[in-house]
């Protein structure tokens, strides 16, 4: 039972840490960037002013999607790293997600 309680405490700390983590995904060679928290909440979007032309709207939309995808991949990697730390390397059952 003590191990379960310790694991629960580590998971709680992990959730708090992930809320404070911010990662930035980029696209278009840095012309668009999206910042997400470790929990996947979007904190910011930056678009280079050179892209803000009406005829480039579709390109900007695609770059925002690409930057968000990049940021989410980074969040997932960070979550996996933190999970490995919190569980002491013990694997979780397949399909079990804590976030």
Image (tube, grey):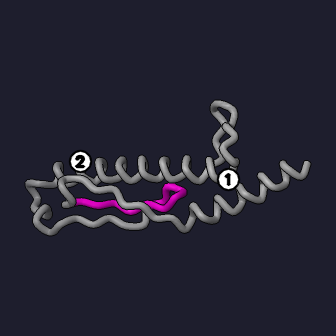
Question: Residue at (46%, 64%) from the top-left corner?
Answer: 22
Give the foreground label among 1 and 2: 1
Residue 79, placed above or below residue 42: above
Question: Residue at (66%, 46%) from the top-left corner?
Answer: 98
Q: Where is residue 72 in the image (x, y as percent from the top left)?
A: 42, 50
Q: Residue furthest top?
A: 94
Mark 1 Cα-neighbour bin, 10 Å: few <14, some 14–19, many ≥20:
some
Range covered by the magenta-colored residues = 32-41
* Side of 90 where 73 appears, left or right: left
- The part of the image, by quadrant, that contains residue 36 is bottom left
The residue wearing badge 2 is 62
Mark 2 Cα-neighbour bin, 10 Å: few <14, some 14–19, many ≥20:
some
Residue 61, placed above or below residue 16: above
The residue wearing badge 1 is 86
Separation of residues labelled 1 and 2 (CA atoms) = 36 Å
Give the SS element for disc 2: helix
Q: Residue furthest front?
A: 89
Residue 44, placed above or below residue 8: below
């Amino acid at each position: 039972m003590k191990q379960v309680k310790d694991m629960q405490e580590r998971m709680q700390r992990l959730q708090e840490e992930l809320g404070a983590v911010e990662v930035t995904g980029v696209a278009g060679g840095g012309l668009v960037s999206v910042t997400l928290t470790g929990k996947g909440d979007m904190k910011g979007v930056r678009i280079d002013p050179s892209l803000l032309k009406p005829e480039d709207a579709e390109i900007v939309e695609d770059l925002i999607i690409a930057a968000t995808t990049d940021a989410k991949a980074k969040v997932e990697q960070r979550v996996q790293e933190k999970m490995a730390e919190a569980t002491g390397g013990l694997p979780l059952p397949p399909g079990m997600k804590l976030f």
